[in-house]
């Protein structure tokens, strides 16, 4: 047996032995009422109207619904690719030019791969990116709402 098991068993046995041998010192109070301080009796004189009616407005109260409104973000859809390697090449090119690029691709799937730039909170910033892409790379990009 391991030493930790032996120590644990000894600890439990010592605990039981001490609990049977040692008697705790229990103090009993014979005069409990004399030890307590007298508290004054407080009388609340609040008039209660037995005929009080609760209006229907209180019963029909509904807490307002909290809506989480985030600002609309925009992204630029650069192009749709059938070949994954072509998309990766364009992704590297756009990253080198300083764009915040991300892609949506499905490896081993027949769905097309999509390359995006963004997202941005200002629509005008995304429109500037589209103009830059059309001017410098002759890419016809589209503006989309970012989900």
Image (spheres, rainbow, N blue to C red):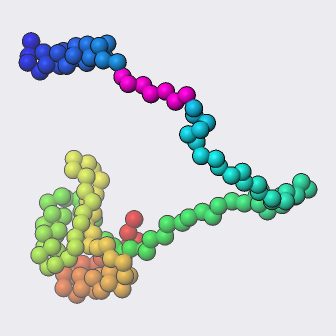
Which residue sits at x=22%, y=73%? 100
Stretch in magenta = 24-30
Q: Is residue 93 above or below residue 127?
A: above
Q: Which quadrant of the structure image shows residue 48?
A: bottom right
Where in the figure is residue 120, as x and y percent of width and height? 33, 77
* Front in this rendered view, residue 58 or 136: 58
* Farthest right residue in view: 51
Q: Quadrant of the N terminus?
A: top left
Is 121 colored magenta in this rendering? no
Where in the figure is residue 2, as x and y percent of width and height? 8, 16
Secondary structure mostly seen in magenta is loop
Q: Quadrant of the C terminus?
A: bottom left
Give the number of callouts: 0
Where in the figure is residue 65, as x and y percent of width and height? 60, 63
Q: Is residue 23 above or below residue 78?
A: above
* Front in this rendered view, residue 114 or 15: 15
* Front in this rendered view, residue 43 or 124: 43
- Kindly tell me whether residue 78 is visible in this rendering: no
Q: Horizontally, is 61 left or right of 77 in the view?
A: right
Q: Is residue 22 above or below residue 142?
A: above
Which residue sits at x=80%, y=59%? 46
Q: Which quadrant of the structure image shows residue 70?
A: bottom left
Q: Which quadrant of the structure image shows residue 78?
A: bottom left
Q: Horizontally, is 28 left or right of 136 in the view?
A: right
Where in the figure is residue 12, as x and y percent of width and height? 23, 17
Q: Horizontally, is 90 left or right of 64 in the view?
A: left
- Kindly tell me whether residue 35 is visible in this rendering: yes
Q: Is residue 100 above or below residue 106?
A: below
Which residue sits at x=43%, y=74%? 72
Which residue sits at x=61%, y=36%? 33
């Amino acid at each position: 047996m391991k030493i930790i098991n032996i120590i644990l068993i000894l600890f439990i046995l010592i605990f039981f032995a001490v609990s049977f041998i040692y008697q705790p010192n229990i103090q009993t109070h014979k005069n409990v009422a004399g030890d307590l301080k007298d508290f004054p009796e407080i009388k609340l004189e609040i008039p209660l109207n037995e005929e009080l009616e609760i209006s229907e407005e209180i019963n029909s109260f509904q807490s307002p619904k909290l809506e989480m409104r985030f600002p609309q973000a925009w992204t630029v859809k650069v192009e749709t690719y059938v070949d994954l390697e072509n998309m990766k090449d364009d992704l590297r090119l756009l990253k080198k030019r300083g764009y915040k690029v991300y892609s949506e691709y499905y490896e081993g799937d027949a769905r097309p791969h999509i390359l995006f730039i963004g997202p941005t909170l200002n629509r005008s910033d995304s429109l500037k990116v589209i103009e830059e892409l059309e001017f410098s790379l002759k890419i016809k990009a589209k503006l989309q709402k970012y989900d």
